[in-house]
Every structure is written in C-alpha cells, then in structure tokens.
Amino acid sequence: MEDNNKLDLMSDLPCEILRHIISFLPLKEAVRSTSVLSTTWRQLLAPLSVNLEPNTKGIANIQQVLGRFLRSYVSHERLKLISFRAAGDDDGEDLKDDVGLIAMATKGVEKELHLHFMENSRKSRTIDHGFHLKMQQTLVLGNVQSFSSLKTLHLRSVDHHATRLVSDLFACCRRLESLTLEKCGGLEDLHVEGCNSLQSLTILDCGDIVSITICARNLKSFSYRGVLPRMQLQSASDLVEANLDFRYGVGGNEFDLEEVLCLLDSLKEVQILTLCGWLLEMDQSFSSFPCPFFHQHWHEPHLWMDYEMVKSNTSQLKHLKIFELSGFSSDDSELLLMELLLNKAVVLESMIVT
C-alpha cells in the first residue's frame, strides 16, 4: 500500500532538467519512454504545429521552417517534434492546393533528423503516383548552414509531392553519415550519389521500387529489405557490411539472373554479407518453371556448370570473415555451398549454421 502511494517526484522537476535527463537516451528510446510516462514527460515532446499560408511557396517555406527548427535547439534538448503543412505552391509544382502535405519532424542532439511524410487528401490516396527520387549533393544556397551539420537523416513515407523537398534537403547535408528511406510507396527509381561523407545507407519496405543506383565511395554499411530490384552499387570498394533481404521476391519486376550475379560480384570485397534465403531456395511446389522465366538465360554457363567447374571458375572471397546460414536443412546444395565458401573464403573467421 505504501509503495502505491509514492509520489512521482521526478515529474515535478523543471522542464530544463527533464530535457537534460532524456538527452542521455537514444532518440527512439526517448520517444518510446516518454509516451508511457506522466503528462509532464509527454508534454516535453508535444509537437509544435506550423501551418503555412496558402499564398506562399510551399517548398521554400518548408525549408525555412526546418532550417529554423534545426537552429533552435540547444545541446541539452534531446528532441522536439514539429508538424507542418504545405498548403500550396504558386507555380503548381510538387505541392498541390488539394493535397496538403503533412509531415512530422523529429530531431535529436546527435545531429539527427527524422522526417515522416503523410498524405492529407482522399484524392491523392486514390491515385497511384510512381516517381523517381534523385539524391545528389551539389553546391546549393539558402539554408545550407542549417542542414550542413546533420549526420543522420531518416525519411519515412516520402511520396511524389515531396521529391523536390527531399532532394534539396539532401543536397544541403554536407556531413551526412547515415541515410534511411522507409516505406516510400510509389518510389520506383532511386539514385543516390555524390555524398562522400555517407557511411551507412538503409532502404526498407519500398514496395514499388524497380531500380536502385548507389554511388557513395566511402559507404561502409548497406542494408536493403524489400522486393528484388535492379540494383547497382558503384564505387563500393570500401563497403564492409551488406545485408540484402529480398523476402518479397521479384514483386512486379522481372527476374534477371545476370543482374543478380553482377550485384553479388560487386559485393565480393565485403567482410560481412547477409543474404535472405529467397536467393538460395526454390519453391518445392513448382515441378517446372514456365517460360519466359528463364528463357533469356538458357545459354548461360551459370545454369549448367557442375560443382567442380563452379569451384574452379569462381574467385576467392578475400575479405569475407563472417558467414551465417539460418534454416539449414542439410540437403546437398547447402552442403556444397558451405564447402565452396570454406574453399574460397580464405580469411573466414566465423561460420554460423542454424
């Protein structure tokens, strides 16, 4: 009974002290923790609403709002939330009056910014807009100083209305080290290049993706989850870790064996490679594969070489140190794969089979 009557003394502390306390938590943990605590804690992270005037330039205003938002926090603040709406764009491009782009921005003291875009129009939700997104760092003016210090950028639910805004923001992030794109419906083509500071890139659950081109010469970690797209990793010699999860199969795309082999070849120098079992398994319910699934590959030696020929014609994996295989069933193909890896991975330190 006495424990149940204990007072919450921490919630009575000044807001400055409470903000300093949550500043020691990672951004996601701070949001999760404060959401289940008292009203006082939740108010620390209450979003600040900013409604842009309909007669202003939507994208320019959003950039200005975000610029002020990033400049406003002091070192002991862990994060704030801000929601903004772009009511229209004078030139009729990117942001439409009848759409109303809604976004939530969350920042942390570790030079971290999360942007979550949400549609606020029934019309825009009923129309399927496929779009391309090119993220390239160039010399730009404007709010460069506001964004140049950002090290982590997490983009969620980017749609075709936000492409210009996102491209402009990325161009300003001169010191960006980590970029994540998540659940960007309608995104068909992604091109990321020219970011010499980028070390980590993550792409998650963008279900309409068809093509991905990455050119970031200092990239150390790359993680992908979604359908199998056409994927090119250019200048990836410094890549240390790669995680490719094609759990959703080819989706609406066509399977191209040569493109997959070229992708795997571009990853031959990585130290840690994680592949989804989809690349290595075959559905036992298929007694045959109908044409034209493999018709363009009937002449290619990869499909008819026996194990000894594969073993003699494959290159050594000079940097692969860790290999993990889950769902091991002890069939002949898996045993041959393990034997091939043991033979070719000359610096392998750990093999985990479950």
Image: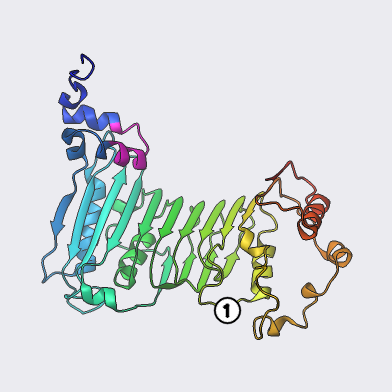
Q: Position of residue 223 (x, y in %)?
A: 53, 55
Q: Is residue 332 above or below residue 232?
A: above
Q: Position of residue 246 (x, y in %)?
A: 56, 63
Which of these two is toward me, 283 or 12? 283
Q: Is residue 155 visible?
A: yes
**Residue 11, located in which quarter of the rendered image?**
top left
Residue at 33% from the left image edge and 50% from the top image edge: 113
Q: Is residue 26 magenta?
A: yes
Q: Is residue 82 above or below residue 89?
A: above
Which of these two is toward me, 318 or 185? 185
Magenta-tinted stretch: 22-33
Residue at 36% from the left image edge and 46% from the top image edge: 112
Left or right of 49? Residue 351 is right
Q: Position of residue 169 (x, y in %)?
A: 33, 61
Left or right of 44? Residue 150 is right
- Tell me the element at label 1: loop
Q: Dividing the image into 4 quarters, which one contains the C terminus?
A: top right
Q: Amino acid at mark 1?
A: Glu
Which of these two is toward me, 302 or 330? 330
Residue bearing the label numbered 1: 254
Mark 1 neighbour density, 10 Å: few (under 14) some (14–19) many (20 or more): few
Q: Is residue 285 above or below residue 349?
A: below
Which of these two is toward me, 69 or 270? 270
